[in-house]
């Protein structure tokens, strides 16, 4: 069985009447090929990183365990308090680990869910793939361009199924938006403007100190260069530090721009130039841009994507009853406007909550209209990828493409200049310093 | 210090120091004023100052390195961010001389008169703009227990034969417990290193948390 079945996004677009997502259908005879669980076999999974989103994933996975889809074999975290809570939550038979490499050693584990801070995503995903594990890894996929290349290569070489946690693509209203846009309802789209509120400033800077006893600081830092512990690094707030997170453009950009790339049919493409400006925090450890404007220029086809991060710039959310597929809009502060030559289209959110305008929700496809892939759910889509070899909706190639937008936006902001990007070669052109910054050497032994 | 003077005037004056040759009294005064703004009690003034530091260039490096040791952590942080701003500005395309000047001013800060925190930061600055002239100084830090891991990573990042040569030599002379690190850098640079074997997948850290049941 060819385990890594590549299906181009455009191949998903089938005429109305054909079953949505038909290319995913694989004859049962090919299931349970080496390295892939059969259709009726339970997958054995482990969770690496179980705070924040990791806690959400553990609870979500318990739902699948209750339905007999998976076994949960292990939980892992560098924080012993969090680990103890996860063990209690996961219940009997779940083994705790501090060091994720014990998880990867276990032959009985088929797949891992990685929800550690951003600076760990690439290393852990690559190591998991090298150990033959299928991977669900939180977004954004990578912190550097070279990490992204390594992730794509590792998934391909080891033929594992990777789903990246930009789950906006799998939301019910995302499907409706996608279908609405690809059928030309607002005409040719030449610009997508993403809106988001500011990244926070650290209102309570504190000096460096000893790490708390429950935290393995060396392991938390992992690939990053060593520095003393400061409680403003973790937990959760790693997002506001450029090295470990990168601000809203990475945290939410990996959602909102993921929708844009998917709906624009732009996965596998990239900008030719990236230009960013922004304002920094005035104090504290956090260094991600507070406000930010980034312009990505795409060629062939020509379109422009912008990331505009300013509190108060959101498009007012539409009124809802709560009976819509996505329910009421609970996070109206971010989303995007699609500018077509026949009109505009707005969505809010783009992550676990993706809400789209009424006109897209209520649009009835005429005969002959194009249909698009409808995800059964983000984890369900991953399980399908594991069992069949089908490409996941937020596969690692696509996710790295989106993460690269975030990485390049931040690089342009840091350097204070426009960058030229060669999508085919996956490299910055004509700027020696920026080229060096396409990778970040990693601390031993936490490296790719 | 209160910043009565407009930022643009200060910066253009400071920028002029880069191109005007020897540091005269006026240029020194401009750098002093810039440093005073970095040390200002107002976070807004400090931020405006470090944001404009790129134009100050090489002449701002030594005084900023001193301020990085300030007791006020926010003042020290402003100085560090100003230094980074200088590095990022100097590394722009078409500014080779400026880049070399900045790298040259940074290099002495790797010496042991500076605290490790400053030296570590300078190492990473040089990882972005350092060249052949910095390699020996960085290479020397491979024998410094506190800084050798940073030095190893920085050499990995600086392209060219010189950095590779230093890493190759270090593989022969490094203590056994650091050879793995050097080998990793060489592998990242595309060199085949049969031994020591990579241990990246070998777990080492055990938890004290017990399973339930």
Image: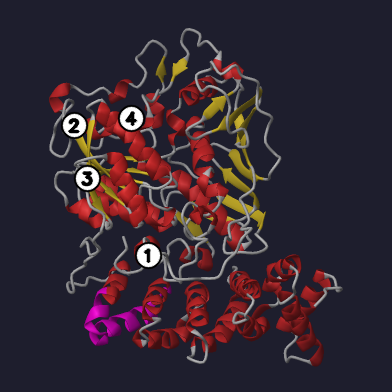
Give whichever of A198, A213 is nearer the camera.
Answer: A213
> Label 3: few (<14), some or many (≥20) within 10 Å?
some
Left or right? Give the position of A15 relative to A307.
left
- Respond whether the residues carrying marks 1 and 3 are from the same subunit: no
- The residue positioned farthest toward the front in the image shown: B213
Quadrant in the picture for residue A59: top left
**Range drawn in magenta:** B158-180
Percent x, y for residue B82?
64, 73
Chain to which the residue tagged by mark 3 belongs: B
Vertical comparison of A442 with A149: above or below: below
Q: Can residue A38 be spotted in the picture?
A: yes
Pair 4/3: label in front: 3
Label 2 CA crowd tier, 10 Å (few <14, some 14–19, many 20+): some
Query: Percent from the top left, x then y, of residue A185?
Result: 59, 19
Tag shown at residue A42: 2
CA distance separating discs 4 and 2: 15 Å
């Amino acid at each position: 069985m060819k385990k890594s079945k590549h299906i181009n996004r455009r191949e998903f677009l089938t005429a109305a009447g054909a079953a949505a997502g038909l290319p995913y259908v694989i004859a049962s005879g090919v299931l349970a090929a080496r390295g892939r669980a059969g259709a009726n076999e339970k997958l054995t999974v482990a969770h690496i990183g179980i705070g924040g989103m990791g806690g959400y994933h553990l609870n979500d996975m318990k739902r699948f365990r209750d339905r007999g889809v998976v076994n949960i074999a292990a939980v892992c975290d560098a924080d012993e308090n969090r680990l103890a809570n996860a063990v209690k939550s996961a219940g009997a038979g779940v083994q705790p680990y501090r060091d994720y490499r014990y998880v990867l050693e276990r032959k009985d584990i088929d797949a891992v869910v990685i929800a550690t801070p951003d600076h760990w995503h690439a290393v852990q995903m690559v190591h998991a793939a090298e150990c033959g594990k299928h991977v669900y890894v939180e977004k954004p996929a990578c912190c550097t361009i070279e990490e992204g290349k390594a992730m794509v290569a590792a998934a391909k070489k080891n033929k594992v199924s990777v789903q990246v946690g930009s789950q906006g693509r799998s939301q019910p209203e995302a499907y409706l938006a996608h279908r609405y846009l690809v059928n030309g309802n607002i005409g040719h789209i030449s610009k997508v403007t993403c809106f988001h509120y500011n990244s926070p400033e650290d209102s309570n800077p504190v000096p460096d100190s000893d790490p708390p006893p429950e935290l393995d600081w060396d392991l938390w830092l992992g690939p990053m260069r060593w520095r003393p512990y400061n409680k403003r690094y973790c937990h959760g707030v790693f997002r506001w530090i450029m090295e470990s997170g990168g601000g809203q453009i990475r945290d939410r950009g990996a959602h909102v721009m993921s929708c844009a790339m998917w709906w624009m049919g732009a996965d596998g493409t990239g900008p030719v130039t990236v230009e960013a400006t922004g304002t920094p925090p005035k104090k504290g450890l956090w260094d991600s841009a507070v406000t930010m404007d980034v312009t990505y220029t795409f060629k062939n086809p020509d379109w422009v994507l912008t990331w505009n991060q300013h509190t108060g710039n959101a498009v007012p959310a539409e009124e809802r009853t709560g009976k819509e597929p996505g329910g009421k809009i609970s996070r109206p502060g971010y989303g995007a406007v699609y500018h077509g030559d026949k009109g505009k289209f707005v969505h809010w959110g783009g992550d676990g909550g993706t809400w789209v305008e009424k006109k897209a929700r209520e649009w009835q496809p005429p005969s002959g209209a194009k249909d698009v892939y409808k995800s059964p759910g983000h984890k369900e889509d991953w399980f399908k990828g594991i069992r069949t070899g089908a490409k996941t909706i937020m596969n690692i190639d696509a996710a790295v493409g989106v993460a690269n937008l975030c990485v390049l936006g931040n690089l342009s902001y840091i350097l204070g200049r426009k960058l030229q990007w060669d999508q085919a070669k996956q490299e910055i052109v004509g700027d020696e310093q920026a080229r060096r910054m396409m990778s970040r050497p990693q601390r031993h032994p936490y490296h790719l | 210090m209160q910043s009565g003077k407009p930022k643009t005037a200060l910066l253009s004056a400071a920028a002029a120091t880069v191109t005007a040759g020897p540091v005269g009294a006026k240029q020194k005064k401009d750098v002093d004023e810039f440093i005073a703004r970095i040390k200002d009690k107002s976070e807004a003034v400090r931020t405006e100052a470090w944001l404009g530091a790129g134009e100050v260039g090489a002449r701002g490096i030594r005084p900023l390195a001193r301020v990085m040791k300030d007791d006020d952590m926010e003042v020290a942080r402003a100085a560090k961010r100003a230094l980074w701003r200088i590095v990022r500005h100097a590394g722009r395309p078409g500014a080779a001389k400026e880049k070399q000047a900045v790298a040259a001013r940074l290099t002495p800060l790797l010496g042991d008169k500076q605290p490790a925190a400053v030296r570590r930061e300078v190492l990473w600055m040089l990882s972005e703009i350092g060249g052949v002239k910095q390699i020996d100084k960085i290479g020397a830090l491979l024998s410094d227990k506190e800084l050798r891991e940073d030095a190893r990573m920085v050499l990995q990042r600086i392209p060219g034969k010189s950095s590779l040569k230093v890493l190759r030599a270090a593989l022969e002379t490094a203590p056994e417990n650091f050879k793995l690190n050097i080998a990793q850098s060489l592998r990242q640079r595309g060199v085949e290193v049969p031994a020591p074997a990579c241990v990246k997948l070998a777990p080492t850290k055990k938890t004290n948390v017990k399973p339930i049941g």
